[in-house]
Image (cartoon, rainbow, N blue to C red):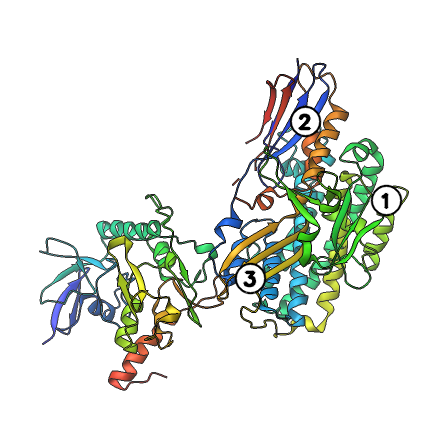
Amino acid sequence: MSQRIVIDPVTRIEGHAKISIYLDDTGEVSDARFHVVEFRGFEKFCEGRPLGEMAGITARVCGICPVSHLLASAKTGDDIFAVSIPPAAEKLRRLMNLGQIVQSHALSFFHLSSPDLLLGYDSDPAQRNIFGLIARHPDLARSGIRLRQFGQEVIELLGGRKIHPAWAVPGGVREPLTQQNRDYLRSRLPEAFDTTQRALDFFKRYADAHSEEVEHFGNFPTLFMSLVSKDGGRWEHYDGWLRITDSEGNVLVDGFDPRNYAQILGEAVEPWSYLKSPYYKPLGYPGGAYRVGPLARLNVCSSIGTPQADAELTEFRQRGNARGVVTSSFMYHYARLVEILAALERITLLLDDPDILSTRVRASGGINKLHGVGVSEAPRGTLFHDYEVDDRGMIRRVNLIIATGQNNIAMNRTVKQIAQHWIHGATAGVPEGLLNRIEAGIRAFDPCLSCSTHAIGQMPMIVTLVGSDGAVLAEVKRE
Amino acid sequence: MPRTLTINGQEISARSDQTILEAAQDANIRIPTLCHLDGLTDVGACRMCLVEVAGASKLLPACTTRVQEGMQVQTDTERLRAYRRQIIELLFAERNHICAVCVANGHCELQNAGIAVGMDHVRYDYLFPKLGVDLSHERFGMDHNRCILCTRCVRACDQLEGAHTIDVMGRGAHSLIVHDMNVPWGEATTCTSCGKCVMACPTGALFKQGSTVAEMVHDAEKLAFLKAARERKVWNV
């Protein structure tokens, strides 16, 4: 008799989801699906709001990465104003986005995923969390929490608060950086570098010792997409051109203005999830599946552009295929740590830039275009905001393409790959530790389902085991 | 002829033409208000300033009740606090007040009143009315979702600017602020674009175009200053 295993809710991710694993008569995995069960509606209820409010409203999509929405929305506003913002405003926005990358990646690695890595997938679920980590590895837990705190402080000292700062606005930013705050952030950098380096050393040793996870946690060819700098195709997080590469390192799209995203990206809808599945149009659905986020950014960029991160990038690519492309989703963790390092180096450069204290930070403008697109790299990948307004600046249509959504196809494949590798002859159910491996496969992507179901919701997680007759055989649920 | 009365047991004197609210303000006794604004006539619309007067069979609005000799007034009883919280909850339930993304967040009299009355939740069902935003004016916008119908804008436009562009249409909870004969604000020919209505607004209902979240700071005190300057030739600079 065939079965279905349900993991519900999937834990230690941002949002609510469940996983269904379908078993055939012999208890082998025939299919697996990652369902996102929340529904939110931002694209609808933003209609009829004034443009000026959009950065504040869309930032509320997420409490983890509000800065990403804030910046993408402000950039959309810049586009509609048709202004170029003061140079200091761009540098300050970049500084805040880097702070956001540090805090979000530190949260993903230390708070959410390191309990699996340090305590073990099969360890007691009641202890397999940040509190268990604090009990067993207090120094690492503390330094991880402090690293995240540093990222949050960058955001707070610029925007006045850690979460949902209404600071970036169409035309620039509302407040400059004070010298006192610049000096404080500088003083926090050495510790942040040290924590990041120790985490990198730990992860490299872990990856070398756990080749089974590297091999089977979402290891398959897909396309990769991210922004790269307009000059030199370097690692980019705020502005630039879109580049799409494949798993052999071939460049399919380059120098592409991200405002024209709709020409190359389509969005498929599946009836079993509120999460849309974007794909690269020329290769169709699901063949045009691509991954975004830290792994994609490191695969796509020509270089990072700062010395320590570039040295780590070289080593990262040595762990990839013959063409230097890293295709295992498990290596998202690694990429995240390299990106924290890159962010810290860039924060150092920005804090040393005399322009960073300029008080000329906001351009004024009116409604000069009726359609605008703003694109930036959120911690989880490329984020698109696309608004149409009327001639008074009233929002008429909103389209948001969120990083996590773009990884949807890859996340589904990852769940299936892990289930097929670790679950065999499961006629009598599956041990919890194996189901946790499947959840961990999703965690590697650090999905933010609150964001990605911006379309209209809530994310604890569920794994369901389903038999070939459709009967639910087992269900793991966490509230 | 001055009048002597007690407020919360405290004996105070007041001019015979003063209201209980004015007498209390002179004596540094705070009575909560929303539709009252220094410089405008009072209409007793919001009922936040209701007080208990000994011998009166019902609660009386402090802003429109004149002092009387020997009056005994209570401004802060358990009954009044319960009613005030109820009033604020009903205002929140009646329209779509989303502080987190409002232009007036942190500078809003309704929000401050909610905090002052200890409103930790609203016990009534929200009505979620579908109301519009008027961005037709060159400089200002009106969001009916955030309007509490205090009519401070109506009175500022009429009594201070003398334009009387703004008025109220409809009845009860379905009332709406309108410009001229219910035309888009930008088409109201009587509007002088002076902005006094925006200064007078206690919430984010009236705002400067382009305002972003928490950026709209009203300047209601300027209206009392204007009135004093105009009528009494007093300039407090």
**Image position of A88 with respect to A138: above or below:** below
- The correct choice, above or below, for A436 with respect to B198 in the image is above
In the image, B229 versus A325, the foreground residue is: A325
Q: Position of residue A211 (x, y in %)?
A: 83, 33
SS assignment at label 2: helix
- Quadrant in which the C terminus of chain A appears: top right
Circle 1 residue: A248
What residue type is disc 3 on? Gly
Q: Does label 3 or label 2 sit earlier along the sequence?
A: 3
Q: Element at badge 1?
A: loop
Q: Is residue B189 above or below residue B237?
A: above
In the rendering, at what x and y percent does residue A383 appear?
65, 52
Letter of the chain that mark 1 sits on in the rendering: A
Residue placed under numbered mark 3 in the picture: A160
| Residue in view at x 10 percent, y 56 percent | B56
Residue highlighted by disc 2: A435
Q: Position of residue A136 (x, y in %)?
A: 69, 36
The count of marks equals 3
Labels 3 and 1: the sequence-earlier one: 3
> In what quadrant of the picture does the N terminus of chain A appear?
top right
Q: Is residue A11 rendered to the left or right of residue A338?
A: left
**Does A234 sit left or right of A164 as displayed?**
right
